[in-house]
Image: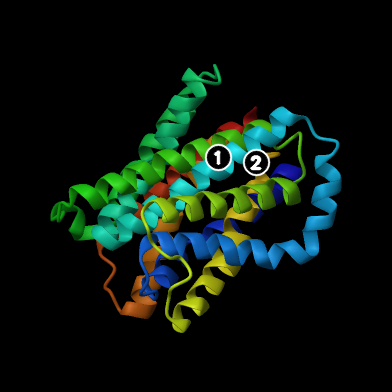
Amino acid sequence: MKQNKYFYLILLGVFSISLSPIITKAASSGSIIIAANRMLYTVLLLAPFTLKKILEELKTRQLKTILLNVLSGFFLALHFWSWIESLQHTSVANSTILVNLHPIFILIISQIFLNERAGKNAIISTIIALIGSALIIGNSIFNLSLNIHGDLMAVIGALTVSIYLSIGAGIRKDISTKSYTFIAYFVAFITLFVISLFIKINIFNYPLSDSLVFLGLALIPTLLGHSLFNMSLKYIDPHVVSMTILGEPILATLWAYLIFHESVSFIQFLGGFLIIAGLFVKMKSVKSN
């Protein structure tokens, strides 16, 4: 019963992160500014309600757990920066399909570093869902406008979020959701701030209108998206979480239709069906275990 509850939370998280590209596109600032302020606004929203309890909890936690939590925040920072950078240098189609490679990376990480064997259903479901992710991009997938920098950053975004999810799954039983989430977000902000100093970009120099974008990113795709994924990692396999995130392109297509009046082709419908089929294969294997 508890697993079913967290499956629903993951679905709410997918709904929330599907709004991320639309909100991000509204900002006029550069990628490092958007990523850093997304994390800063999130930390500022969480701190008044959680900081005291978190500090008390950390006194009782092992140093190894805290260090791994810090490491996960570092990779989360790289994920946000690289993904937003990809959106600004390549098409949404390219960025979406490449960043959705994370289930493959998680399977590789699980087998090489965590000594976990990927079952037959895991491999089949991943392949089915990834084919669906490719198809849902529609006709643009057959007319890719290649941008090496942007496309590479999208792949880096997929790799870094895979590491972030894998680390989180490994320590979520040893630390509360509040502490894990706050530390990850805080470290992500510090990481992005330090990077901004090295590349000499003032992350606090942005138009006032962008502050609403940062607030929207903090509230919806971060607190209602990534935070729910963090909560679920304590009970749900990271590959399942990663697979479920592949449902994002389905919702992104819907938003594009409703907001930008983009047509929905048969290929996109087929892609959505394959993603759902891949998720069904994976969920069935989870429930049978």
Sequence-wise, the earlier of marks 2 and 1 is 1
Rendered residue at 42%/33% (across/down): 105
Residue 271 location, x and y as percent? Answer: 33, 52
8 sits left or right of 96 in the view: right
Label of residue 189 in the image: none
Q: Which colour scheme appears in the figure?
A: rainbow
33 versus 242 height, above or below: below
167 versus 192 height, above or below: above
The crowding category of the residue bearing disc 2, from other C-alpha atoms within 10 Å (few below 14, some 14 to 19, many at least 20), is: many
Secondary structure at badge 2 equals loop
Judge whether residue 276 can be spotted in this image. no
Rendered residue at 43%/56% (across/down): 196
Amino acid on which the number 2 mark rests in the picture:
Leu
Query: Disc 2 designates what residue?
Result: 233
Question: Of residues 249 and 111, which is closer to you in this image?
Answer: 111
287 sits left or right of 2 in the view: left
Question: Of residues 80 and 201, which is closer to you in this image?
Answer: 201
Query: Disc 1 designates what residue?
Result: 165
